[in-house]
Amino acid sequence: MRKLVFRLLKLPPRLFYALGLGPLYGRLVMLLTTRGRRSGKARVTPLQYERVDGTFIVGSARGTRSDWYRNLLVHPQAEVRAGSARFTATAETCTDPASITDFLELRLKRHPRIVGGILRLRGLPANPTRADLETYAAGMAIVTLTPL
């Protein structure tokens, strides 16, 4: 049942991009296309992202257990569609809680309502401290996507 819910959540972003509405939807959500680690098939995952100095950073709330994350460990090249941009990128994975906390602080600063709501759903206080975020970050992972 859980897999079905996640598959259904992936449909709207993919539909928006397919209809050419990526520039509207893409300021918050990118489409990341990885290659399956076992099958080799293309796998498309919509992810929230942040653009920092020409790179794109995405977080994995499921940490290293996310399929897209595990695919990138085996095949670090991926296709990215973010807004009207489309490019091939190299992925660099990170599980360091301090780096993930920096990413969460950046996201919270840029999108306080959306990210704050997500963090509250995960049990964090309305105004989390760095220590709160570091504790939360311990089970997460991030990926920096650098365009080729």
Image (tube, grey):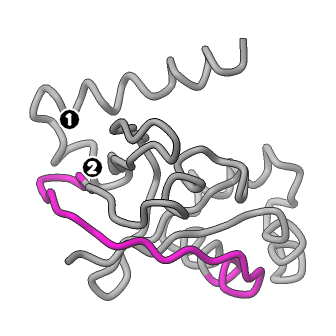
Which residue is disc 2 drawn over?
Answer: 26
For the residues labelled 1 and 2, the Cα–Cα distance comes to 8 Å
Note whether 64 is above or below 4 in the view shown: below
Location of residue 7 in the rendering, given as x and y in whole percent from the top left corner: 52, 22
Residue shown at 34% from the left, 50% from the top: 30
> In the rendered structure, does residue 91 fall within the stretch colored magenta?
yes
Stretch in magenta = 81-102
**The C terminus, quarter of image:** bottom left
State left or right for residue 102 relative to residue 140.
left
Q: Are marks 1 and 2 in contact (CB under 8 Å)?
A: yes
Which residue is disc 1 drawn over?
Answer: 17
Location of residue 145 in the rendering, given as x and y in whole percent from the top left corner: 38, 72
Residue shown at 33% from the left, 46% from the top: 31
Residue shown at 33% from the left, 47% from the top: 33
Question: For residue 88, which numbered disc appears in the image?
Answer: none
Determine the image quadrant of residue 19: top left
Amino acid residing under circle 1:
Tyr
